[in-house]
Amino acid sequence: MAAVLDTQISLDALAQRPAATLPFTYSSYDFAKRIMDIVVGSLLLALMAPLMLVTALLVKLTSRGPVIFRQERAGLGEQPFTMFKFRTMRVGAEDDRTFLNHRNEKDGPVFKITNDPRLTSLGRLLRRSSIDELPQLFNVLAGHMSLVGPRPLWMPEAKKVTGPERIRLAVKPGLTCLWQISGRSDLTFAQWMSLDQYYVAHRCLLLDAMIMIQTLPVILSGQGAY
């Protein structure tokens, strides 16, 4: 399906390594991918600008709080960066998470509720359509993220990822990935991590292109988005 990385990575050997010692490589693939991120990311931002402006206005008019939600996520090597999204929840929603832990529907360290009571009415639509993720194009252009790569976890969740699953930290997080086109939140945490491990071991421009091409139909279907 795709070419193997130039430097072979033994997942078992990485089981106990801290993120700071994960093996990073920079190849012609990485250079070409960065160029693709800049070119395609800029085109997407230009195309999506009208939709983003309308969305920003609607978020501002329909609920109290900032238009953009900022959260610290784990990037390459578990280095924190600020990820941008259109705000989909009411102000103070982060503080209420502790009180909703008993309703968590996901395994592993992640938190997800199908009908999250913290979502605004507009926020549900933005989540379902993935429009809330569009501001991450700025993260891509800034180099914090790539168009394709493992989805960035919230820092407290990322620190709970152990064993071979930590290999996901050896590449930049992405706007879309194999998890995104394979069921998203309908998958178990173990399935999610397995897809990320597969991507890291087989990543190449062809695989990246295939993932990007399949992303739009999945977004339009709304599968696993909540």
Image: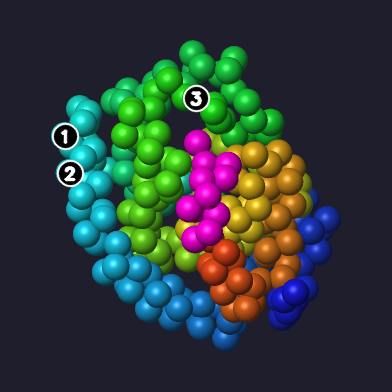
Q: Is residue 9 magenta?
A: no
Q: SS class of the residue under badge 1?
A: helix
> CA–CA distance between discs 1 and 2?
6 Å
Do the residues bearing badges 3 and 1 touch, measured as CB atoms within 8 Å? no
> CA–CA distance between discs 3 and 1?
23 Å
Q: Is residue 220 magenta?
A: yes
> CA–CA distance between discs 3 and 2?
24 Å
How far across and how far down the image is residue 160, in percent? 64, 37
Nearer to us in this view, 128 or 26: 128
Disc 3: which residue: 115
Disc 2: which residue: 57
Coloration mode? rainbow
Q: Amino acid at mark 1?
A: Leu
The quarter of the picture where residue 91 lies is top left
Q: Which residues are magenta?
A: 216-226
Disc 1: which residue: 61
Q: Residues within 10 Å of mark 1 (few under 14, many from 20)?
A: few
